[in-house]
Image (cartoon, grey):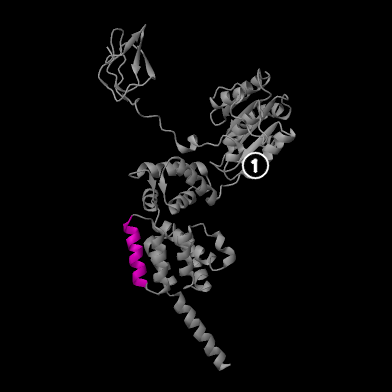
Amino acid sequence: MASEGWKIGRRYIVPRTKVWIQRISTDLVLRTFKFKSFKKKFFLVSQFPYLRITTFLYLAGMENFVVSARKYRPADFKSVVGQQHITTTLQNAIKNKHLAQAFLFCGPRGVGKTTCARILAKTINCESITKDFEACGTCDACVSFQNNASFNVYELDAASNNSVDDIRNLVEQVRYAPQKGEYKVYIIDEVHMLSTAAFNAFLKTLEEPPKYAIFILATTEKHKIIPTILSRCQIFDFNRIQIKHIAEHLKYIAGMEEVDYEEEALRLIATKADGALRDALSIFDLIVTYSAGKKVTYQETIANLNILDYDYYFKVVEALLEENISTTLLLFDEILKKGFDGHNFIVGLSEHLRDLLVVKDEATVELLQVSESVKGRYLEQTNKASVSFLLSALNLANQCDIHYKTSKNQRLHVELTLMKVAKLNQAFRLATLAELEVKKKA
């Protein structure tokens, strides 16, 4: 009987395991079990007449995978990455009881707007707030919030609920005081998607809400919000998260997940994320899944993200400094054969030349966002190049980037730029000789 499941009323209790459900009907039992281990947990399978399920249910020895962006989502102010100016202000507002009736969180994607809104909602309703003005995480209000069962926090997606009727329903809800707790918090995400009529319907409630109601609006496009809404909100501008902060957070997550990593790979992921921590965590999950084991290496990262290895830029600049046009063109051909776009190459070369210029001065070395080992290579190569060469090469590369799209022969356009850069030192020498000749004649 164990191989068929246990029937209770009109339901079957099935050991949590890998199951192929062939057919469920009134008198049908489950067949074909492949037990890995019996657990105390059980899975209730309701009977649905003549329903055919043609998928495997992977239920034994395997938990549902949760992406890092959700699994390690900050639960308190101190764990928010790179937004200390926001979290400190909010904590002081809670401490001094100076909470505004409406907040507007604006900034790029993936920097913690909705996360901070949820943390604020959780903290102000906490029944035993800590000395640091953080939510305790153990009281009934915190537990219900963490289980998505709080009746005091409402989230509305303005992208799909942007009509006057949706706002009217929201205004109707605001009339009712919270049954438990001090505040009812309304989080409206992507608020710039509301229609003008919906914004106007929201104005009066936003200006004079009940004392227990707090509105938190979040948007990536503040300029689309009408001025009358902006004037009624306390505005918080979220910054793009710095590369070093993203890299440090990735190191923490890699340690928690027992993932081996190379620091240069994490820095590359942080750079690719363009200041968005959520994007960085998505890329991190992708690389971990792509790799053979639980590791994140530099080579696997550039292969998966289709990024040109910085070694090529060092080789190209080395050839340019040696005025070796043949080697430069062969390297560019090799890059194209690997499937990289000429435009991406010239943009990357411009960034490399900029980095070489940055490390020329000790005061600006900190602007270089690379590991110590790679920084040594930059310092070594920049000593071989003059400031004049780097500035002229950067200018030529920038002009190539600007005119790339309009060029009829884009490969020749890049090659011509490389040849010009390769002859810069020769041009400087000729200019110096000409200047000396003029001085002799004078």
| Extent of the magenta region | 325-338
How many marks do you count on the picture?
A: 1
Q: 280 left or right of 41?
A: right
The front one of 91 and 165 is: 91
Measuring from the top left, give residue 350's x and y in whole percent: 48, 62
Please tell me which residue is depicted at 46% across the width and 38% down the height of the picture: 68
Residue 49 occupies quadrant? top left
The front one of 417 and 234 is: 234
Measuring from the top left, give residue 149's x and y in whole percent: 55, 22
Q: Which residue is mark 1?
A: 86
In what quadrant of the picture does the N terminus appear?
top left
User: Amino acid under label 1?
Assistant: Ile
Is residue 10 in the magenta section? Answer: no
Measuring from the top left, give residue 43's x and y in whole percent: 37, 18
Residue 41 occupies quadrant? top left
Residue 107 occupies quadrant? top right
Is residue 326 in the magenta section? Answer: yes
Name the residue at the bottom extreme: 441
Within 10 Å of the Cα at label 1, are there few (<14), some (14-19), or many (20+) other Cα atoms?
A: some
In what quadrant of the picture does the C terminus appear?
bottom right
